[in-house]
Image (cartoon, rainbow, N blue to C red):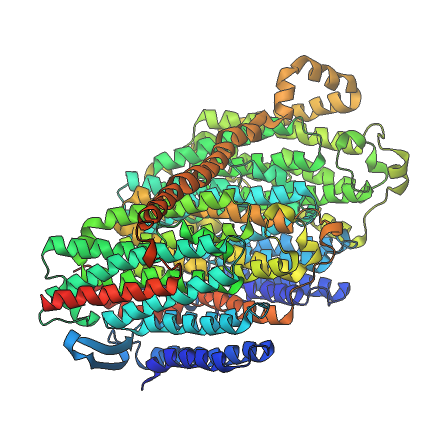
Amino acid sequence: MGILSWLYVVPLAGMLVVMCLPKDNKKLIRWTATLISVIPMLQSFWLTWDYFFNYSGSAAMAYVEGPFNWIPSLHIQYFLGVDGISVPLLFLTGLLSTLSLLASFGIENRVKEYFAFFLLLEAGMMGVFVALDFFLFYVFWEVMLVPMYFLIGVWGGPRKEYAAIKFFLYTLFGSIFMLVSILILYFTSNPHTLNMMTLIQSGSTLPYTLQMICFVFFFIAFAIKVPVWPFHTWLPDAHVEAPTAVSVILAGVLLKMGTYGMLRISWPMFPQPLRDLSFWIALLGVIAIIYGALVSMAQKDLKKLVAYSSVSHMGFCMLALAAYSSTQAISGCMFQMVSHGLLTGALFLLVGVLYDRAHTREIAAFGGLGSKLPIYSSIMVFFTMGSLGLPGMSGFISEFMIFIGSFSVLNKVMVGIAVLGVVLGAAYLLRMVQRVFLGEFNLAKWGGLTEINARELVTVVPLMLLTLWIGIYPKPLNDLMNATLTNLVNLMAR
Amino acid sequence: MADYLFLIPLLPLIGFLINGLLIGRLPKPVISLVGCLSVGGALLLALLAFFELKGLPVEARVMQQVLFAWIPSGSFHVDIAFLLDPLSAVMILVVTGVGFLIHVYSVGYMHHDEGYGRYFAYLNLFTFSMLMLVLANNFLLMFVGWEGVGLCSYLLIGFWFEKKSASDAGKKAFIVNRIGDFGFLLGMFIIFWQVGSLDFATVMEKAPTAFSFGGGLITAACLLLFVGAIGKSAQIPLFVWLPDAMEGPTPVSALIHAATMVTAGVYMVVRSNVLYMMAPDALLVVAIIGAATALFAATIGLVQNDIKRVLAYSTVSQLGYMFLACGVAAFSAGIFHLMTHAFFKALLFLGAGSVIHAMSGEQDIRKMGGLRKYIRITYLTFLLATLAIAGIPGMSGFFSKDEILWQAFSSGHGSPIFWAIGLVTALLTTFYMFRLVYLTFHGTERMDTETKHHLHESPRSMTVPLMILGVLSVVGGWVGLPAVFGATNYFEHWLDPVTAKGSELVSESVHASGGGNAGLEMTLMFVTVLLVIGAWMLARYMYVRHTETATRVREKAGGLYTVLLNKYYIDEIYGFLIVRPFVGLSTFFWKIIDVLVIDGFVNGLARLGALSSDLLRFVQTGRVRSYATLFAAGVVLVIGFLILR
């Protein structure tokens, strides 16, 4: 078994181990789960390192396992492999999973189930990013839904049932479209296959109408995940109700599956529909950027604000994806995926830190925290600045690359409007900073708040360092993806 | 030979890291030492670099240092690299020189503040960013510094963040600047799209072929870049943040909101002078905006009562002057005024700080008066700076202002109208500055006895920087003596290598200074000086001799006075026309589109589903697991059916 299999097998085995632990020993469960997740994290780090030095020069899949015939009668294969677009996301998944588990130590209710579900979730995410066979991909895609549903529905806030069902049905709705597309591809290929790599080559030979149907269906499935406006309304509810760690995973990894799916599957597979629809995709991106930012501005709940900001930030990815013929834009899209994972992941962690102490997330309830919690406030302001795209941090690199790439190939006015997102981003984030951290401190109400503790610092400091690293020296990440992306752009712009 | 350039910004960055990361752990003397020495070191290196550059033959005065490839992505490539040429050499000297003095001054001024360490950390971070801005060798790295100084400005305006007005002002500054950045970014995109590079040297070299002269694209690019400059340098219509920025500590106002950061827009325009020379329409817009702002802000400055606000509007007005210079293609005159302004305006702000310090925090000049007896050094230096800004012959401001006025009149891009506006502005400036001096330092003592009891001259760490800046405010202009005096304008020639390429593009705009028009130039200068002295005397008459006239004029002016006092109600108009609609829109999108329309549809769909499933209730166990099983079974069935078909 190769390293890619281990990436999802270890958390899966970890889930079984956790399920066998005594239910009352919460400490044991927490540490076991966290330590188990360190293994795939280190594996993903090693993978990134090794890929960078040994494989990043070519666009070919690396660490390939298979294709082995798995269920021959249905032509289902066991086929794994990674390239420059999956490696950074595996890195992010490994890192954020462990950090989220660390941030879950406050969970007191049904601890065993929580951590078991979390490891299952990690297995599903790892699986999605390594699968190269549609059957496997689909299985992993759906496997994630179940733990996610329960993590929100059981450990969530007051409206958890509504949020969980909404999340589940939305995604399932999209999955059905994806399934239909997969089936179309399966039955039109000759010989029948579910091998994604083969289908990428043959997909474009289908009749145009069929291509268009498949493209749109895939788009719906992935767009719901991203989420693209107007499929986004599950996101704020899910985020607000979900426990902190689940929000981190949701924003940090799950949303990226939508954009990953587009880059991995539907974009290179159907270049003609892509070309014909690119204007509309860009339009959806621009709407998401502006709309998400404006709606963020109206939010009264801190977490909801961050959730809507995700809609805006993922809109940048959509804009970039519409500019599929520009290497800069597509690189920018990948940078944005990683950067958003780091920044928004950190913001959710930090909102959680405050919520654990104050038991409210209402923006208006706070004020002047800067004088009482200087370290916490500085870190929060740091990530806010990252989120609004300040140079020196990852968000600037990604946004800039997206803009400069899409400007040369897309409608200039549209990109111009998208750049307005930069102004709106500053407006809603600074408004939040002012109302939570600046102004007079309410000693009577919040005198008991304590400063961020060591465990919580451990969860955010790595994200700070990575954000800065990508912002100051993005070349390694760029080099890691470059060969793959160049090849991809050629495929998409066929 | 240029391998130490990176140290110039690096030193303040190190200072920031030490003071920032060890916040609350270092004793005050160490903080001051780290803060001042890091900038002092940068100043020494800047001097070294300057003299090395000066030692080179004129045409070879460019030093570059490439640190590393920053964003290499396909055809897009940007380095972290520094460029030292005559223009950036002037800028780093101003930034580190004035910056160093203000750091030293801050040691005294901020001594009792709780956030001492935080203050110096921010100030060092600012110096770092500003140096990045002026040393960058490409537009993008310049933008990094541009955003960096914006952040520091935000942090320092809101330094006393418990105060709502301070945090409001910081937020406003950041957001208004972002509007400018929007233009800057789009300008960069057009440049990259057409030229394929953001590197200054490459862009300036290729622009004449990549763009058509006076074409729509180059004009758009220049105007968009200028939007960035308007934001950063507080010009109409984006000047509204600067007066509010006075909420920050006074040395910050001196450093960031007078001497350095706000001049970044001017620097950027001069840096891109080749592009602007190719877009005469854009140049005209620059001149119009500059002239309009100069006049407009000066009129507001006439009636303000807060000592720092008067200076703030004066800064806006003087920045307008610099843009007027750029707009008539007198780029070196713009930079010359930038430099002399840095000296005398920093001095004015620091002097105001010393006054506020002496007055136990009072900023209202109606509650001052007669201070010259108590704070002698402050008074004398403040007076020197006032003479300089008023343009009294011999003072630094005289030379730079005269240069701008003459160019506005005579340059190929100029016009007598620009000259007239410049002249009126100069008279207004003289008037409001002497009004300020007389109300603050002369006349009756209007403060309460408590304050009067505490009046004292500031400590040495504050007065020494005042005196040094006082000297600079006098002699700072002597490097640019007008050619009409038969002297050599060293300053203009120093910048020749930077502006030469642009002026080659347009032969008719070659400077008309000196030569045949010497008589005219002398006459205009003489008229200006005479009128300026007249304005001075008028202020003296109204605020020293016959103080009742001021009241009478105020009553006569009535409505106009109120409009000026309320700054033409610009803030209110923006609030009504821009802020409110956006806030309304955001609530509309959320409450109506998101919650009612989209979610209404989604929930309706779900309800419809629930309704129809009432019929199928027997399979509805309510458990998602069984749904998933059923779902999987369904999938298998469908696949099976399709295969067996």
- Residue at (80, 31) in percent of width and height: B367
Which sits in the foreground, A58 or B387?
A58
> Residue B640 is drawn in which quadrant?
bottom left
Q: Taking A69 as reference, is A449 above or below it? A: above
| Residue A489 horizontal side relative to residue B623, left or right | left
| Residue B488 horizontal side relative to residue B345, left or right | left
Q: How far across and how far down the image is residue A400, in percent?
A: 39, 55
Q: Residue furthest top?
A: B556
Which sits in the foreground, A16 or B218?
A16
Which sits in the foreground, A202 or B310?
A202
Q: How far across and how far down the image is residue B334, in percent?
A: 50, 41
| Residue A481 horizontal side relative to residue B378, left or right | left
Q: How far across and how far down the image is residue B641, in percent?
A: 14, 65
Q: Taking B338 as reference, is A59 above or below it? A: below
Q: How far across and how far down the image is residue A188, in percent?
A: 11, 64
Q: Taking A98 as reference, is B371 above or below it? A: above
- Residue at (50, 62) in percent of width and height: A154
